[in-house]
Amino acid sequence: MLPMSCYLVLGALIFGVGVLGVLIRRNVLVIFMSIELMLSAVNLTFVTLSRYLETLHGQVCVFFVMTVSAAEVAVGLAIIMMLFRNLGTTNIDEVRLMKE
């Protein structure tokens, strides 16, 4: 079995990739996927710490995070589809221009 630090480092790397995706990319879909990647990294950290501490608290938190994430996906994809239908693009810079 791998030590706990390997899982925590993996979670930190995945979270870092998600943060870079949010900060660098301009496409709403890529930003949305990056946010989901960050949520998955946090879930990995919760499960790792739950296993290390031998409690179920982290796994219960993961269950709730996954539930909220599923609702976020449903609402977020509906918003993205409406943006694309109305504006013809998913570029976040052009969406900002429409707000002014």
Image (cartoon, helix red, strand yellow):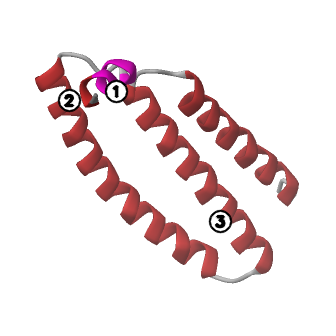
Image depth: mark 1 or mark 3 in front: 1
User: Closest to the observer: 62 or 84?
Assistant: 84
Q: Identify the residue at image location x=22%, y=40%.
A: 79
Q: Could you say where residue 31 lies in the image, as x and y percent from the top left?
A: 46, 32
Q: Could you say where residue 75 lies in the image, as x and y percent from the top left?
A: 24, 50
Relative to 55, is 34 above or below?
above
Image depth: mark 2 or mark 3 in front: 2
Residue 32 in which image quadrant: top left
Give the extent of the magenta segment. Answer: 92-97
Dot 3: what SS? helix
**Which amino acid type is marked by label 2?**
Leu
The residue to which callout 2 is attached is 83
Separation of marks 2 and 3 at Cα, in angstroms: 36 Å
Asked if residue 94 is among those painted magenta in the image, a careful observer would answer: yes
Q: Are marks 2 and 3 in contact (CB under 8 Å)?
A: no
Q: Residues within 10 Å of mark 2 (few under 14, many from 20)?
A: some
Asked if residue 24 is among those painted magenta in the image, a careful observer would answer: no
Q: Could you say where residue 25 lies in the image, as x and y percent from the top left?
A: 51, 22
Relative to 48, is 6 above or below?
above
The residue to which callout 3 is attached is 47
Dot 1: what SS? helix
The residue to which callout 1 is attached is 96
Dot 2: what SS? helix
Image depth: mark 1 or mark 2 in front: 1
Overall secondary structure of the magenta section: helix
Q: Identify the residue at image location x=72%, y=63%.
A: 48
Separation of marks 1 and 2 at Cα, in angstroms: 11 Å
